Image (spheres, helix red, strand yellow):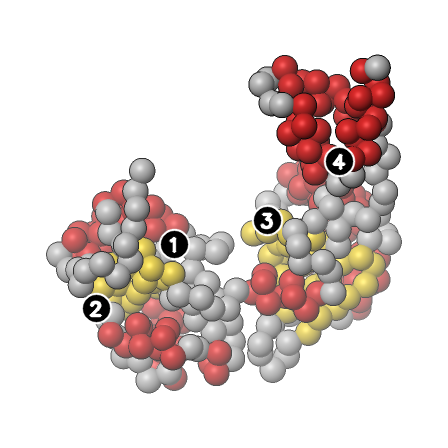
Amino acid sequence: MQIQKSYADEGGKLYLVPTPLGNLGDITLRAKEILTSADYIACEDTRTSKVMLDRLDIHNQLVAFHKFNSQKKAPELVEKMKNGAVIAEISDAGMPVISDPGYILVEACIKAGIPVIPLPGPSAFVTALVASGFDAQPFTYYGFLSRKASEQKPVFQAMKEAKATSIFYEAPHRLVKTLKVMLEVLGPDRQICAARELTKIHEEFVRGSVQEVLDHFEETAPRGEFVMLVSPNEEETVVDLDDLLVEVDRLVADGESKTRAIKMVAKAHNLSKNELYDRYHQAKE
């Protein structure tokens, strides 16, 4: 077990610093302070990050840390932090670690006992979620999907059945092809949202059925990176009470009390525990 006291000392540490998705006005005062004072800034693409940081008047030593060098670079950066260096890790845009190799450095720091301090800030999928019009609780984030239709289909099948909003990222040149796979699995009427260029001048939300969104992007060429959201499955699930009673008995056999087992099963299936309690005792009688 490890307990981290993030601000216990002045030694080396890793800050996870979110950067603006596009609008530089979204940088926070704390993020700018950390980026200015850090000994090093670890970033995916030094060229991309330098342009952004120059515009924010932040001139600091950049270190490339991306999926091609992360395994080799992580130990080097950990060694710097062991010697007292403060490193700020950023993504090309948004929250580091989300759909980038940042977790490799985080994992290495945790193993070495180096504090990992996250700053709150922008994330593309959360930004899209709150404006999608779909229920934000619960949601499932899938990141980038496989490019192969055969590997996408099981994922879309899970989204089709999910009672949560489903979210993933897609590149513009693959969007239409992916929408066609969605049409095949989800059907034409499932409601989705395609969000692009978030916080930028060309920010756009395309909301509608799978068929409508596909038709739109077959006529209008997709541009910019996309956050795709699939609405929750709102079909009523028919619950067999006899099956739930068997589930209660299984939990009781595993050592749970009858009252707690009934409460657990009722909560899992969004049922009244009193109704299930009455039905359980009627069956036993």
Measuring 31% from the left and 55% from the top, which residue is drawn there?
Answer: 116
Type of amino acid under label 3: Tyr
Measuring 39% from the left and 50% from the top, which residue is drawn there?
Answer: 103
Q: Is residue 6 left or right of residue 284?
A: left
Determine the CA span between mark 2 and mark 3: 33 Å
> Is disc 4 placed on a helix, strand or loop?
helix
Q: Earlier in the sequence, mark 4 or mark 2?
A: 2
Q: According to the image, label 4 marks what residue?
A: 273
Determine the CA span between mark 1 and mark 2: 18 Å
Measuring 29% from the left and 50% from the top, which residue is drawn there?
Answer: 4
> Mark 1 Cα within 10 Å, few/some/many (few <14, many 20+)?
many
> Mark 2 Cα within 10 Å, few/some/many (few <14, many 20+)?
some
Q: From the viewer's side, name the closer residue of 104 and 83.
A: 83
Type of amino acid under label 1: Gly
> Mark 4 Cα within 10 Å, few/some/many (few <14, many 20+)?
some
Determine the CA span between mark 4 and mark 1: 44 Å
Residue 248 point in image, percent of width and height: 71, 23
For residue 102, the mark is 1
> Is disc 3 placed on a helix, strand or loop?
strand
Tell me the quadrant of the picture where the C terminus can be found. top right
Type of amino acid under label 2: Asp
Q: Is residue 37 above or below residue 251?
A: below
Measuring 65% from the left and 66% from the top, which residue is drawn there?
Answer: 130
Q: According to the image, label 3 marks what residue?
A: 142
Q: Is residue 264 left or right of residue 236?
A: left
Q: Is residue 131 left or right of residue 54?
A: right
Type of amino acid under label 4: Lys
> Is disc 2 placed on a helix, strand or loop?
loop
Q: From the viewer's side, name the closer residue of 28 and 263.
A: 263
